């Protein structure tokens, strides 16, 4: 087994961490600042953490505009990145001056949300309107503060394109979600052929 202790470096051409913990869903996060200026950025350190109430979260390496906006307004919108939106999503990761609009840069359409001020990406078939529940600064095992911020939000409203619902069942693969893998540029998507099912022991 190849062995390393991250505190001493990995000794490999690329850090394998995000290639191993992958592919990951993308938190494509729309927010506004206190003056209503829009922002949109992808975060692949992202996941869902609770069912009821639904809570999702992403981690920002450094205090980025998305974190600043969300702490200011206590709201954000998550948008599903689908295969046809992959390059637009990538464009929205560009470091623009605070207040420059990633929607315009990426040719995306902002539409009003129902409950929060942050806009939804109209081209995305699923949007979650969220309210900030916690913004937590990470620490190492020894308690040393890390310059990384975990932003958790309660999903207060859900929009789903009805073409993704078959007999009321949401079709994960039909949406062709974009998933982030390792290195500087690797992604995957999925289709129905990769599906398999497992019944939990307690449910047998
Ligand atoms: C697919 C993808 C995933 C990313 N994931 C993260 C992440 O998890 N954490 C992070 O801090 N930056 C991540 N980035 C970089 C941010 O998107 C980038 O720094 C962006 O400019 C932040 O925007 P903001 O300052 O408007 O929030 C990712 C970029 C891409 C393209």
Image (cartoon, helix red, strand yellow):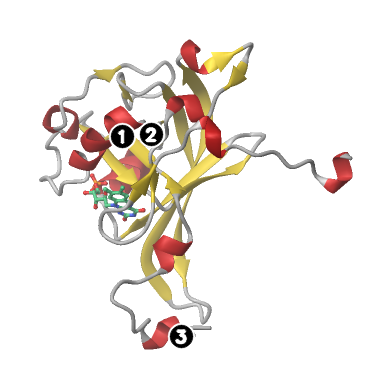
Residue found at x 51% / y 41% = 56
Left or right of 125, for residue 134 = right
Residue extending farthest to the bottom is: 8
The residue at the point 48 percent across, 46 percent down is 57
Q: Earlier in the sequence, mark 2 or mark 1?
A: 1
Residue 31: numbered disc:
1
Q: Is residue 193 left or right of residue 147?
A: right
Q: Nearer the viewer, mark 3 or mark 1?
A: 3
Asked if the beta carbon under badge 1 is closer than 8 A to the nearest atom of ligand 1, the reply is yes
Residue 34 in picture, x, y percent from top left:
26, 35
Where residue 112 sits in the image (x, y, percent)?
32, 16
Q: Which mark is residue 4?
A: 3
Q: Quadrant of the C terminus?
A: top right
State the CA–CA distance, disc 3 to disc 1: 38 Å
- Most foreground residue, 27 or 196: 196
Q: Dot 3, how many residues are within 10 Å of its Cα: few (below 14), some (14-19), or many (20+)?
A: few
Q: Indicate which disc, 3 or 2, sits on the residue closer to the N terminus.
A: 3
Q: Is residue 40 above or below residue 2?
A: above
């Amino acid at each position: 087994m190849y062995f390393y202790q991250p505190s001493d470096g990995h000794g490999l051409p690329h850090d394998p961490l995000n290639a191993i913990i992958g592919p990951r869903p993308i938190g494509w996060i729309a927010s506004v600042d206190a003056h209503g200026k829009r922002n949109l950025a992808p975060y692949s350190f992202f996941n869902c953490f609770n069912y009821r109430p639904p809570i999702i979260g992403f981690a920002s390496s450094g205090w980025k505009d998305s974190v600043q906006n969300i702490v200011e307004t206590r709201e954000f919108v998550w948008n599903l990145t689908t295969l046809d939106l992959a390059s637009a999503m990538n464009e929205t990761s560009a470091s623009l001056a605070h207040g420059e609009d990633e929607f315009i840069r990426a040719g995306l359409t902002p539409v009003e949300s129902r409950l929060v001020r942050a806009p939804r990406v109209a081209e995305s078939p699923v949007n979650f309107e969220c309210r900030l529940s916690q913004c937590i600064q990470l620490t190492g095992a020894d308690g040393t503060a890390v310059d990384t911020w975990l932003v958790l939000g309660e999903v207060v409203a859900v929009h789903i394109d009805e073409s993704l619902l078959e007999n009321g069942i949401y079709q994960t693969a039909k949406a062709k979600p974009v998933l982030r893998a390792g290195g500087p540029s690797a992604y995957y998507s999925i289709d129905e052929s990769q599906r398999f099912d497992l019944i939990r022991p307690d449910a047998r």
